[in-house]
Amino acid sequence: MNFGAGAAAATVTVTGKTVAQMEWGANNNTFKTFKDIEPKSVMDLAVIPIDPVDIGLGSSDKGHGHPISTIKPRKKTMTSVYLKFFETAPDGKSRRCKFCGQSYSIATATGNLGRHLSNRHPGYDKSGEVATNSTLPPVTVVKKPQSQGKTSQVDYDHLNWLLVKWLVLASLPPSTLEEKWLANSYKFLNPAIQLWPADKYKTVFHDVFRSMQEDIRASLVHVSSKVSITLDFWTSYEQISYMSVTCQWIDEYWTFQKVLLDICHIPYPCGGAEIYHSLVKILEMYNIENRVLSCTHDNSQNAIHACHRLKESLDSKKMGSFCFIPCAARTLNLIIEDGLRTVKPIISKIREFVLGLNASAELSDEFSRLAIACQETSWKPPLDSSTRWSGNYQMLDIVRKAGKSMDALIRKYDNTLGSRLLLTPAEKNAASIVHDHLEPFYKTTNNMCMNKVLTIGLILFFMDHISETIAACREVRHYPDWLKNSAEEMAKKARNFNNQVCNIFTYMSAILDPRIKGELIAESLNSENFLEEARNHFIRNYSTSHFPSMTGGYGAQEIEDGGSVSFAEEIARKKRRASMSNSVTDELTQYLSEPPAPIPTDVLDWWKGNSARYPRLSVMARDFLAIQPTSLAAEEIFCGKGDEIDKQRLCMPHDSTQALLCIRSWILAGMRLKVKSTEIDYERLMELAASAATTADNTTSASDKKQK
């Protein structure tokens, strides 16, 4: 299933000119804040003539949804010297400034034209066409009767809709647009601009949220497989606790699908009971409580308690199998933190050096030059200075691979960097030891971040390797005692994770990964009892339920005949069912008997190509391979991307958090922004904005050439 198109809806068409092109698009994941956008891309929006746009949501505040009353246009006879700086349009209905191309109605008073020249073009009377008299003569206006006509209604709602998307993609609350500097900037460029009040933006966000959420609910009805969910928690600057719930599954085309279901406020005291009730509401709203196979939580005790209650509830209602597992990435991050604990002060000194390096092009260039001269690894600024694992390892890497260049730069720029950043021989030695010890961890996390689809089997394979690395550290004689003590703490966390994750569900998910199967399965899961239990689960749940044509039920003709079945037919059906059970078992046996696929193999592509060979087993694989080993994407835990997300969440006010963050996630996933069954056609808006910007540029260039 593809969320890119959303549900069927009317597509908004936009006609006429529109605003200049903003610096973000609907088809990528990048966005810029106002301070990052070039002046032209935002501020020129106000000076481009805009025709009415019907978006089906009412007009701007200026119009209040009512037509503008007709007035009698005035025809003026003017003798003002200002007029020589304006040229009359061919249609005789407007005048255009010769300097900037700004258009005014033919009925505009010359006083306004004079203010435009004074404000926008100081010194205009000394630029080429100089007025011969510095004393301005009085303006004589003669009103003449003219046929009654309607002034064209200007609707700026499409500008507000562009701002809606900008707020969403930049994760900014509607209150951003209440800043006086922003409103005044628009007013300065075009007094007719009317931005919506913040309350209207909030209402629009709420309507969009409900419309898009309903589309997701309707789409999930058509999902034919089991689904898995992941939980994430955070606290805002207002000390309000939130939970995000994300749903994952594998569709019939063997494509991994993921969608955010909701972001909800966890009421005080934010314990396991409150999390459980909030989670149940979301599952019931989307009508998936009977299809949830697993839940991956953030390892907190409150989340574990909530998942345990959910399992008890689902088991009591006989809604099918359900399991909950801890987040492997968070566990691994905690293990790494134990390994870094002793060298944290050293890492802080190196980070200060890196921040200084990133802030100065001169220092960066000199560091690169010194690294080449010292035959050390080449470095490309800016360097990763985040406080996440990727940044911490970068600090150790600099000392290990460019220590001489670092020392030389600090000594050369002592006044800028300070000699306090020089590392002692003991600090360098400690950093190098920890670097060597944690290098396998870095390779593991890097692989997790780059992997297209993380599976339980692959993660447990990695965690087995991590446990072996920790055990080997304690056996190395030349390692210092402080590192061996850290290894003891790391080993405890690894064992605790293995104990929590070891169950029949993770075993079945692991063996259904064609790269793992039985040969590379984690030691903690390598049990004959698990294999036998997996066979029973397969036969019980996947032998006939997904293949009604192969069941032993009555056919249509038999029902017409009164349902009578001969004694011989009953015996024949029993034999067929027994044969089918053997066939199912043979499917699993044959699959496990073949050698594992190479590790680089794309798991979903493998099953897509082999589902015909294993028709029943492939159905089970679709369910169990969707179980998530991490509650978040690995890069959000190990890399600086997580810092960006934390900043967005922390600063979001309570009245905007749910709607704005959900809409942002859905748009980045490919859904169309939609409100009350109407899609906002941003692609068309952006095309017209680009066209309008080009027209404005050409007009300005032509005006400049004419002046010259």
Image (cartoon, rainbow, N blue to C red):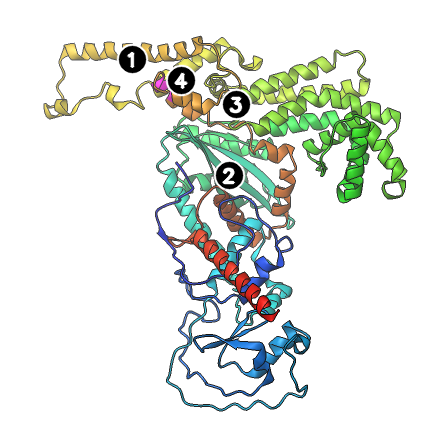
For marks 4 and 2, give the one nearer the viewer. Answer: 2
In the visual, does 660 lie left or right of 384?
left
Residue located at (74% from left, 11% from top): 475
State which tag comes first along the sequence, 4 or 1: 4
Note whether residue 198 is visible: no
Q: Which residue is mark 4?
A: 537
Which numbered tag is attached to residue 245?
2
Which numbered tag is attached to residue 560?
none
Quadrant position of residue 341: top right
Mark 3: amino acid: Ile
Q: CA distance from mark 2 to mark 1?
A: 39 Å
Query: In the picture, which quadrant includes the C terminus?
Result: bottom right
Q: Which residue is mark 3?
A: 456
**SS under mark 4:** helix
Q: CA distance from mark 4 to mark 1?
A: 15 Å
Q: CA distance from mark 4 to mark 2?
A: 28 Å
Q: Nearer the viewer, residue 111 or 270?
A: 111
Mark 1 Cα-neighbour bin, 10 Å: few <14, some 14–19, many ≥20: some
Q: Is residue 301 magenta?
A: no
State which tag comes first along the sequence, 2 or 1: 2
**SS under mark 2:** strand
Q: Which residues are magenta?
A: 614-618
For marks 4 and 1, give the one nearer the viewer. Answer: 1
In the visual, does 686 lie left or right of 13?
right
Q: Which residue is mark 1?
A: 580
Q: CA distance from mark 2 to mark 3?
A: 19 Å
Mark 1: amino acid: Met
* Rendered view: 144 above or below 305: below
The spot of residue 136 in percent (x, y) is 64, 87
Mark 2 Cα-neighbour bin, 10 Å: few <14, some 14–19, many ≥20: many
Residue located at (35% from left, 36% from top): 222
For marks 4 and 3, give the one nearer the viewer. Answer: 3
